[in-house]
Image (tube, rainbow, N blue to C red):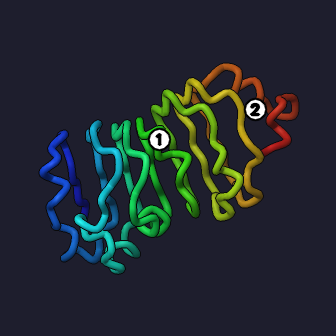
Amino acid sequence: MKTTIFDENNPFLLHIEPLRKHTSVKVLRIEDCSYLEAAPTESWSFQNKAFLNSSSWIILQSCCLLASFQNKAFLNSSSWIILQSCCLLASKLSSLMHVRLTRAYELQSLPQLPSLSSLMHVRLTRAYELQSLPQLPSSLRMLWISNCNEMLKERCQENNGADWFLM
């Protein structure tokens, strides 16, 4: 089942409780909520353990001001998270295996990346302000960088780049 919530900036939608009954959601997409700063997960019924454990993909798109989820277990329960134009949230995730940051236009650093000990795949696209990478976790198996800052591209050049030893 694919569940889509929030197709427009409507604060009333924050109080709906459609997720309580769903126990097999595989993809959760929250998009185009430019005024959403924090997700009040209690009103969304994300405390439902079956829901948390079943959600494999979380897609957050164009939620520019979204900086936190009150229930961090919600984000940490998913193995894939795609953040598109959600720069404030990008650095606050804790135990992920796969991260795709797209259109992260204002993302300047990834200070939390070294602490993600389960991280296996990172894909960075259009992170124009990101100029270097931190030490990457030893669990990382794939790093994909495309359409990013030219300096980052140079720093990640195989065998020559200043950040190559971090990978």
Q: Which residue is more in the foreground, 71 or 114?
A: 71
Query: Is the residue 121 above or below the residue 35 in the image?
Result: below
Disc nearer the start of the sequence (2/1): 1
Q: Which residue is more in the foreground, 111 or 18?
A: 111
Query: Which image quadrant for residue 118?
Result: bottom right
Query: Is the residue 164 above or below the residue 138 in the image?
Result: above
Q: Tag 2: residue type?
A: Cys
Q: Tag 1: residue type?
A: Leu
The percent position of residue 3, horizontal first and vertical second, equals 23, 59
The percent position of residue 22, horizontal first and vertical second, equals 22, 74
Query: Which image quadrant for residue 31?
Result: top left
Picture disc at residue 156 = 2
> Between tags 2 and 1, which lies in front?
1
Find numbered disc 1 in the image and state the secondary structure of the residue it sits on: helix
Query: Is the residue 33 above or below the residue 71 in the image?
Result: above
Find numbered disc 2 in the image and state the secondary structure of the residue it sits on: loop
Q: Residue furthest top?
A: 150
**Quarter occupied by the N terminus:** bottom left
What residue is shown at x 44% (from left), y 44% (from top)?
Answer: 83
